[in-house]
Image: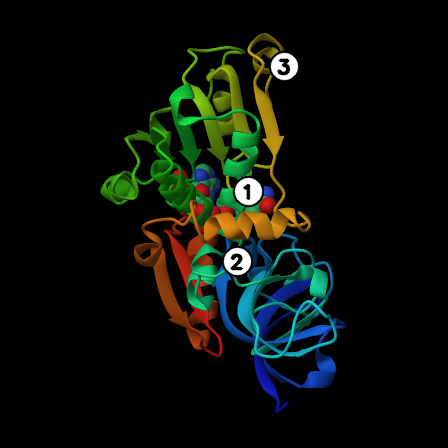
Amino acid sequence: MESFKALLIEERDGKVESGFVRMDEGQLDPGNVTIRVAYSSVNYKDALAATGAGKIIRRFPCVGGIDLSGVVVDSADPRFKAGDPVIATSFDIGVAHHGGYAEYARVPGDWVVPLPAGLSLFDSMVLGTAGFTAALGIVRMEENGLRPDKGPVIVTGATGGVGSLAIDMLAKLGYHVVALTGKESESEFLRGLGAAEILLRQSLDLSKIRPLDSARWAGAVDNLGGDVLAWIASTMQQGGTIASIGLAASMKLNTTVAPFILRGVSLLGVDSGYIREPYRSGVWQRLATDLMPPHLASLARRISFDELPQVFEEYIAGRAKGRVVVEIAGG
Ligand SMILES: NC(=O)c1ccc[n+]([C@@H]2O[C@H](COP(=O)([O-])OP(=O)(O)OC[C@H]3O[C@@H](n4cnc5c(N)ncnc54)[C@H](OP(=O)(O)O)[C@@H]3O)[C@@H](O)[C@H]2O)c1
C-alpha cells in the first residue's frame, strides 16, 4: 500500500485542529478488515469533532469521519473477502479509531456491514449515520406501536441530515409528517420531501411549556433536545412515541413526568453507535428496500476530499441542509 491522504484531527496546547497529512499502512489502527475508502459523509458530529466545537474525539490524533463506504482490500475476518463492497459506521470510527476521512481504513469486522443489494457505495453515504439513525428511530417507534393511522409525526431539525431523511422515509411509509424547522425559506424543500405541514420553530413559545398541552403527535423524531423536546413531550397524544436522537439545540431536558404517567408517552433513546448485529444489518436492509428515501439523490451534495474542511462551519452554524457526501477515493 502506497502512502495515502487523510484528514487528521490533533490536539495542540489544548486546541483542536484538523488538517491533511500523508499516512502509511503502519499508522492504521488495529483491525482485521482493511478497506479502500470510496466515500465518506459529513454529520453534525463530524463537524464538532474536526473543529473542536464539541468534545467528540476520545483519542488524539484521530482521522475524522464517522462514516465510510468502500471495498475490502484485505480481510482476516471470514465474513469478508477482498473485493467486497462494505459500509462501516459508528462504534469508535472517527472518534477513537481512525475514520473515513482517509483513503484507507482498518477496522474490526464487527463494525463492518456488507453493502445491501440495491444500494451503491455513494448512496450508502448519502444515508450514512444520519440515514441509519433516522431509520433506527422509525423502526424503534414502529416496534412501539406507531402506525400511520395513529396520527401525525413531528420531525425537528427538519432540514438537517437526520431530519430530512426521516421526513422522506416517513412520508413514503404513509405518515402525516409535520416538519419543525428554523428555516422558513426551506418550506418548499421540506414539502418536496413529503412534509404535509411546516411549523416554524420561531412560532413556538418555549418560555411557557405546560406539563400537558393539546395532544397533537402520535410520533416524534427529535434532533434538538432542550426546550423543543420538553414541548414535544407535553404535546404528545395518548400512547405516543418519541425517538430522542439529537442535541443540536441543547443537551438538557427540563420536563415533568406528566406525559409519561398520564398519557403513557414513551421516550425512546436512539443510539446508532453501538447497535449490534443482526439488528444493524437489518436496519441497513430496510434502508435498501422499504425505507429507501425516494428523494435520496436530490438530498446529496457531492464534494471533493479537498473541499471537506470548508463545510464544517455550516453545520456548526445550523445552516446544514440535506447530506454532504465526500468523494475520498471514488467508487
Ligand atoms: N443518537 C444518535 O445515534 C445520533 C446519530 C446521528 C445524529 N445524532 C444527532 O442528531 C442531531 C442531528 O444530526 P444531523 O447530522 O442531522 O445534524 P445537521 O445535519 O447539522 O442538522 C441539524 C439541524 O438541526 C437544526 N438546528 C441546528 N442547530 C440548531 C440550534 N442551535 N437550535 C435549534 N435547531 C438547530 C437545523 O435544522 P432546522 O433549521 O431545519 O431546524 C439543522 O439543520 C445532532 O444533534 C446529532 O449529534 C444522533
Give the residue drawn at x 74%, y 84%: 26
Measuring from the top left, give residue 64's x and y in whole percent: 60, 66
Answer left or right for 152 relative to 312: left
Callout in the foreground (1, 2): 1
In the image, residue 25 above or below residue 291: below
Position in image of residue 221 (x %, y %): 48, 34
Q: Residue furthest right?
A: 30
Q: How many marks?
A: 3
Q: CA distance from mark 1 to mark 3?
A: 25 Å
Q: Is mark 1 within 8 Å of ligand 1?
A: yes
Q: Which mark is residue 257?
A: 3
Residue annotated with mark 1: 136
Mark linked to residue 123: none
**Is residue 96 in sight in this rendering?**
no
In the rendered image, is residue 272 in sight?
Answer: yes
Q: Which is nearer the eye, 84 or 297?
A: 84
Residue 77 on image: x %, y %? 73, 70
